[in-house]
Image: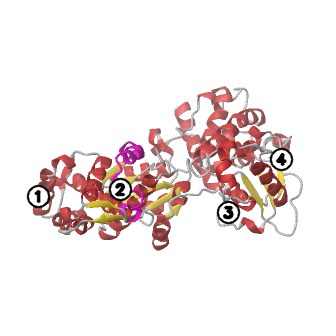
Amino acid sequence: MEHRKLRELTLGGLAAEHDTALQQYFFENDMFRGVVMGRTRILIGNRGSGKSAIFKMLAKKEQAGGTLVEEITPSDYMYDFLKNSRQFDSNAEWARLGAYTASWKYVILVTAMRLLHARHKNLKASPEHANRIKVFLRDNADEHLMSPVDLLVKFLKKFASVSKLTFEGIQFEDKSGQLEKLYKLDHIRHVIPSISELTRHTKVLILFDELDHGWDASDDSRQFIAGLFRAAIQINQQFPGIGVLITIREEIYQNIPELYDDAQKIRDIIEHVRWTPEELKVMIAQRIRHALEILFEKAIRVSTTDSLWEYIFEKDIEASGVSTFKYIVDRTLNRPRELIFFVNECLKAHNMAEKIGRETIEKVERGYSKNRLDDIASEYKFQYAGLREVFETFRMEKLRWTRKDLEEHWLDLVEGAKPCPTAHNWLNEGCPPDKLIEILWNVGFLRVFMKTGCSPRDGEDPNFVGYHQEPTLNIGLFNHFDIHPMFRSHLGIGLSRMVEA
């Protein structure tokens, strides 16, 4: 291969919604197969874990098989708009959750009717059912043309119109049973048998993706998602022919206590999106193969993932004995977007004289490390404002930490010896040292030494693992930690990065 051409390679976009070639190299792993088979209805994962890619490919696959698909994306739900058009008093949280749930059920069913009506000529059920839906949409033409969020707000206003605020909180004037009718979706009851009948013959799939856009951790944001979550569960149970699927970011899911009770009951349809290094290697190898075939306009006769990787990368980091793939993937939280970004940056920075090796990887790592530190701080900005300031207090510090070391570091933070003004509130209110250690573990900054009763040895130790590898680990049982390799380069931690690998 002419290595000077490496710069011409690109392994695809970082965001699935903008990656036009995704179908050419998408890796169908067990997570994807679970969604396709209907086992999984709710995907929970961090930024860049591949949730949107799974939904995008699912939509293509289902549409090809005749399923009616609607993808509802961030432009349709704006948390600021909901906050500014608030319908309920903050003391009426229980009422708001029920109203959001009923309103979302209404939005989902109207969306299903729109899809069915658009295909009414091809529907196999009795014409009377298609006609009943047609009449409903005609009689509610304004709703038929509304975006999902506009329709949601309109239905929420119906709840507000039958309620009043008193000094005792919220009470409902419901002399004519208006509230009960709203909760039971009485307005749509007469067409529900038709929806059920039509979807027995024609499957409908409604996908809610990227709920993090505009998320601000407000009460309205939480009720918005909690209501959607409950509505999706209820619709999936009531209508076998309608599939409602949701992706939600891990940190948002953890920030909405209202979801926990529901999750306990439907754990079998929830999938946490996590990748192994082996899966990541297959994913990136398929992208490498596609990029090479596009560049050289011919099939690449390389069969294994290792061979495809080594087509553009040196096998090892010179004399260290650490493979280039392991070195790079160890600097991720096992998220596809991280690996794609790192490799694409290596391709851009390559000197074109040979395969990509130590010099290029080390050059790229500095910028990558800063970008990922910033990204993680941004990812958790609502739970832990000023997290970046906390990260920076570890600059030029040692690589390995005992629990006692971290407790002393915590004391420096809360006493102001290492100032973190933006993080001051949560650091000084209900955040003892053990809690800070847990937070730094959960966000991926710290790794824990798994073996008890002994200390880690010098050099890289495979017994250090991160939250992304062992999310159920009780770290209170462990006393030795290190800084995750992803953050080290930017923070100047470790004098010989390549030797430690």
SS for callout 3: loop
Disc number for residue 321: none
Residue designated by label 2: 88
Disc number for residue 131: 1
Q: CA distance from mark 4 to mark 1?
A: 69 Å
Mark 4 and mark 1 lie on one chain; the one further toward the N terminus is 1
Residue 172 x, y percent position in the rendering: 28, 65
Is residue 298 shown left or right of residue 455? left
Asked whether disc 4 touches disc 1, contact meaning CB atoms under 8 Å apart, the reply is no
Q: Is residue 86 magenta?
A: yes
Foreground of the two, 468 or 445: 445
Residue designated by label 4: 500
Q: What amino acid type is highlighted by mark number 1?
A: Asn
Mark 4 and mark 2 lie on one chain; the one further toward the N terminus is 2
Mark 1 and mark 3 lie on one chain; the one further toward the N terminus is 1
On-image quarter of the N terminus: top right
318 to 191, vertically: above or below: above
500 to 112, vertically: above or below: above
